[in-house]
Image (cartoon, rainbow, N blue to C red):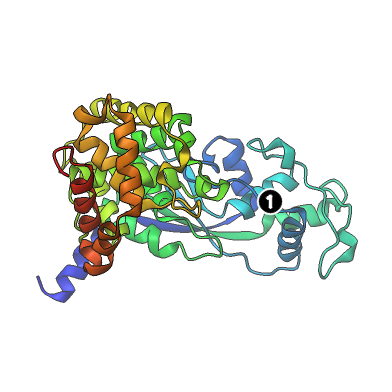
Amino acid sequence: MNLEETIQKRRNNLRADRLDMSFGELMNIYEDNSLVITPEYQRTFRWDIFQQTRFIESILLGIPVPPIFVAEDDKGKWELVDGLQRISTIFSFFGLLIENETKNNLTLEEGDLISELKGKTVNDIGILLKNSLKRSVCRVEIIKWDSDVDMRYELFNRLNTGGSPLSEQEIRNCIFRGHSNELNSLLIDIGSSDLFRNIIKPTDKQIEEMFCEELVLRFYTFKNDSLKLEKNLPNHLSSYMRRVAKQEISFDKLAEQELIEKYLNYLNDNFEHTIFRASNGIFTPNYFDAIMLSLNKYWSYYENSSEVFRKKISELKTSDEYKDAGLSAYSQSRIESRVLKAFEIFNPNGN
């Protein structure tokens, strides 16, 4: 195909729409249970009172509001993808926020430009200003689920340029969850489990950004697909998840879940969370890859030899050859080089 034909084909694979809607209309849709503002990939409502007050002040002053992004499912229901803090602020001010009752019924602070906002609730501002808020317009960008999977991922990725962008894994979860994707549901089940988090000890920020789910995806991608990156790590992980979603690659959810839970139980029973951490206490994804994949490769040997496995982990972490394997390789093969060197270290038939 020539350039024009390629562009036209890509455009035809995208199903998107945009509407200018008032906040009052969005509130009605929300109360109708047709707008989900806290889907699995969304972060929590974390704006403080000052940030919320400044947003309400901006609307009252007529300052343009950035667009929000929603994903439409096959039943016409919308899921909020970007704009949680802004939408939650409006819903909280009007006493509609059911997802976080502790932040409902917002009482404003003194504004940067309107000091008289201090102490005001929605019932204190009068009908004129209340209606002004409801009638203020917000652009709604709608991405429909019948869009091609590849184009949806690219669209969400490129639209996600705000002050608090979604992580790569949050975007993957957003895109691929609309496809009865067994891999995606398993990533969420394992990544959010106590079994996994006990051995990873993620920070609150990592939990918000679905760091655990991405680690599980790393394991499945490197175990089932390839250790050599196609372009870079985010693209490599997304490519595997996309191909599973399109059923180009088979994925047995029950078998894979049983397998990883077996390994996680083994690690929780025999090791501390420092197993994947460097000497400075920082979690190291390279150790996660090396240890998890080596455990998978040599499970029959180490299943009943946890102390030997512990010694191999110490050997890995002090091995100059393991460290050098990543430094000397090209970026696309760096992970592969390190994991292959780890296999040599953990090989029970080795030295």
What residue does disc 1 label?
Answer: 89
Residue at image location 20% in from the left, 58% down from the top:
337
Going by the image, does 204 lie left or right of 315?
right
Residue 336 x, y percent position in the rendering: 21, 56
Which structural element holds mark 1?
Answer: helix
Residue 128 x, y percent position in the rendering: 81, 56
**Residue sticking out furthest to the front:** 351
Residue 145 visible (yes or no): no
Residue 183 x, y percent position in the rendering: 29, 37
Residue at image location 27% in from the left, 51% down from the top:
149
Amino acid beneath label 1: Thr
Residue 132 visible (yes or no): yes
**Residue sticking out furthest to the left:** 1
Picture layout, residue 83 above or below residue 198: below
Q: Nearer the viewer, residue 143 or 216?
A: 216
Pick the quarter of the image with the C terminus: top left
Q: Nearer the viewer, residue 90 or 339?
A: 339
Residue at image location 31% in from the left, 49% down from the top:
316
